Image (spheres, grey):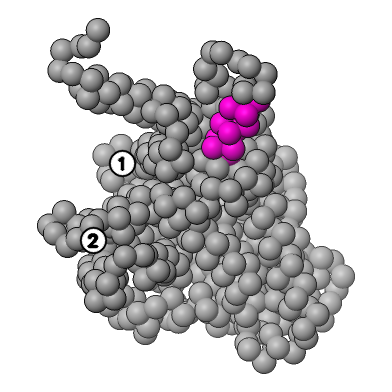
Amino acid sequence: MRARGGEGTVSRRASVAALSGLAAVAILVRALAATVIVFPKPEDTAYYVAVARNLLAGRGLVTDALWSYGTPPLVLPRPAFEVWLPLPTFLAAIPMAIFGSTFGAAQLSSIAVGAAVPLLAWRLAGDAARDRGLPRSRVAVIALGAGLTAAVYLPLVLHSALPDSTMPFTVLALAACLLMPQLVAEPRRGGARDARLIALGVVLGLAALTRNEAAWLALTWAVVAWTARGIPRRDRVRLVAIPGVVALAIFAPWAIRDWAAFGSPLPGQALANALSLTGRDIFAWSDPPTLARYLAAGPAVLAELRIAGIAHNLLNVLLFLGAPISLIGLVALPWFARAPSLRPLVVFSVLTFVITSLLFPVSTTWGTFLHAAGPIHVLLIVSCLLALDGVIVAVGRRRGWTRPVAWLGPALTVFGGAVFCLAVLPSFGAGSRDTQRLYAALPGAMAQAGFPLGGERHVITNFPIWLSETAGVTSLALPDEAPASVIALARAFPGTRLVIVTGADEGRYPTAIDARQPGTECFDEVALPSSVPDSASIADTRVFRLVCP
């Protein structure tokens, strides 16, 4: 019996109902995760939120923290986004303007954007299943299963509670990778294809305002368009040129702003980061990364850095956070990588993994690949579900099953993803609460010690963004260099007399001071009182007063 309106109407209604339910689940899960993560951790999240707060206060796109010294002008406050990009801040500023300039308000933007990822995963998985010629019922089950799995998948949920670049870039990259197969499959020129080309250009331009990996996304389209079969060369040029022009037009105003603020339209420091030998080279003051120093490290060290970068990206970012779904998806990916609907995402994933692992092997261990890996996680989810579907069908044939069990694969991935997320997410929340308590207790302790942070011109610290965000003081990154370098930094910023080392840092400080290395005679330790509320949270915090002129 057919419902009024015909089979197509029923199908559309079913799709709308499925997507509405999927969106509701995604929003609910992300909202719950946001209640667990109460502090902007890691520091780059605090950076986006702090700049949004400054923007709403009428100060413009400025920051009160100098977290790196690789891009002039070295002034405080300083123009923001010498390396990172502004779209996440603009998104966070929207709910902050309505509900107040708080971290919780900023999280509303990441919840909303992150909730779009399962919807895109639903569409991508459906297209991939259709590429394999699967029956409509199994296509629907796999698509919905991919969406629900993405809704509870730990890496996607975690970053949906953090208003940074991860989720906006994931949404834009997935949207681009969904548009690309449609464009190369379009039989001839026409208004519809031109509209899609312009849409792709808009997506690429917005991605370029989100993360620098948009360059690899644009390169992906060039590869896909240029290698597509049955398209004349002149048409291939047009396919690449139109989105390129649109994307450049969107990015151009920001490039002009960067040129005026930093003397270059491109994030030159991002290239300098490729010469890092340790993660703390980004904080260097006296000994910044150079090509000569990099090459002097020798082939063995440079090869070791790349092995570490590959291992970090593969294990820490892709496999451990998404196990066991990510492992199954990665193992099965070679069987599905040639699907037309997945090809752009596969090309982007390979380009991003290889480039970050080999060209930025140190920076990637500090988050470069992590924040660009959202689309790759979705690819692994889709690959996992296609693999489980194939295995279940093969087992059913061998055992003579007569009832359809296509739901079994999605049930396993949703259950596994949800259990893993529930097991691990609380530890991230506990870490955010610990950091929140530390920076809540620090100003009171400093005031009782006779050095109120509001009275300091600048403070040198190992977490400058967190300190400036919570204490309202301009902060300088603590160089992981000899004490003489720290003293030189303080002299370059007159009025700087405090060095604060919070938490159990793995860098040179405070060990170098305890070891009485040359120059530490200028560091006079300040005793923090134990009578302040929540004093246990600052037990590992050390404060030093610089006494040398």
Q: Nearer the viewer, residue 432 or 310?
A: 310
Residue 162 visible in the picture: yes
**SS of the residue under disc 1:** helix
Residue 358 in percent (x, y) is at: 63, 72
Which range is magenta?
Answer: 384-395
* Residue 464: mark in rendering: none
Q: Nearer the viewer, residue 357 or 448?
A: 357
Q: What's the residue at 49%, 61% (across, down)?
A: 347
Which amino acid lies under the numbered mark 2 shown in the image of this protein?
Answer: Leu
Question: On the image, which quarter does residue 18 sit in?
Answer: top left
Q: Is residue 528 above or below residue 119?
A: below
**Residue with the mark numbered 1:** 95
Residue 393 in percent (x, y) is at: 58, 27
Q: Pointer 2: residues within 10 angstroms few (<14), some, or many (20+)?
A: many
Q: Residue furthest bottom?
A: 292
Q: What's the residue at 52%, 23% (across, down)?
A: 406
